[in-house]
Amino acid sequence: MRRMATHVITGAGSGIGAAVARRLLERGDELVLHARDAGRAKELAARFPGARTLVGDLNDPDRLSWAFSHQTLPERVDSLLHIAGVVDLGPVGELTPKAWRHQLNVNLVAPAELTRHFLPQLRVARGHVVFVNSGAGLNASPSWAAYAASKHGLKALADSLRQEEHGNGIRVTSVYPGRTATPMQAKVHQQEGKEYDEARWIDPESVATALLMTLDLPRDAEVNDLTVRPGH
């Protein structure tokens, strides 16, 4: 019989994160859903009955440790799923330090800090850390400098962590989805001045299927890097 696993998930409010959270909840796993504030935590708890919540602002990684010290953290973590992300497009000549910091904080520094916090629990469980990266984590395009830099950094974080924790039995996977039909994608199209047609892009459920495959792979194998592209 399969043992119930505990997953800590960021970004469960929409898109890929919501699809992954729903699928894991449906199969009877325990969820700890990260929320940026108490109001958001209440929404997530209502949307995913039985899930626990963990509050902390990813845009302020320096205060995550303080925030978590006032909450009950799970004793066991089988997987830490970094799915939250922000994007703010602009050419290098126009991007402000605030835009750079926001994307670097949420997309890179906060995942590193969350990982640091949960490593003891992950080591005990011989768990799995999954970073939902982006095609921009492999190639940078005009107007994507800050976002791509944060995602290139996330690849470096995953690659280093994988080698550091291999001896502790922790698996580390980077997933690189192409454009996916999420609220973030709608915002990107708005910033690009393009019409948004969600039918052209990957269904979040398809990315969730790929991500769950990496979690469910037998212990004799590990997916390091997984690229998911639109099929049409």
Image (cartoon, grey):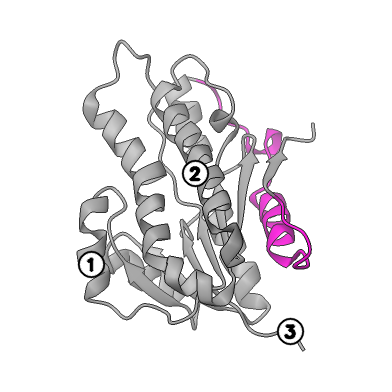
State which quadrant residue 137 falls in. top right
Task: Specify the label residue 170 is tagged with.
Answer: none
Say what secondary structure mark 2 lies in.
helix
Crowd class of label 2 (few under 14; some 14 to 19; many from 20; radius 10 Å)? few
Q: Which mark is residue 2?
A: 3
Under mark 2, the amino acid is Pro
Q: Is residue 189 magenta?
A: no
Nearer the N terminus, badge 1 or badge 3? 3
| Residue at the limit of the structure toward the bottom, as seen here | 1
Can you say which quadrant of the picture contains the C terminus? top right
Give the CA separation, mark 3 to mark 2.
34 Å
Q: Amino acid at mark 1?
A: Ala
Left or right, 120 with respect to 95, comes to right
Q: Which mark is residue 67?
A: 1
The outermost residue toward the front is 167
Q: Toward which corner of the image does residue 68 lie, by quadrant?
A: bottom left
Residue at 32% from the left image edge and 52% from the top image edge: 58
Give the mark nearer the N terminus: 3 vs 2: 3
Which of these two is toward me, 31 or 221? 221
Pinpoint residue 144: horizontal percent, then vertical percent: 45, 22
- Percent coordinates x, y for residue 93 in the rendering: 31, 10
Residue type, label 3? Arg
* Stretch in magenta: 194-223
Looking at the image, is 116 positioned above or below residue 4?
above
Q: Is residue 225 above or below residue 117?
A: above
* Quarter of the rendering occupied by the N terminus: bottom right
Gap in Å between the C-alphas at discs 2 and 1? 27 Å
Q: Which comes sooner in the sequence, label 2 or label 1? A: 1
The residue labelled by disc 2 is: 183
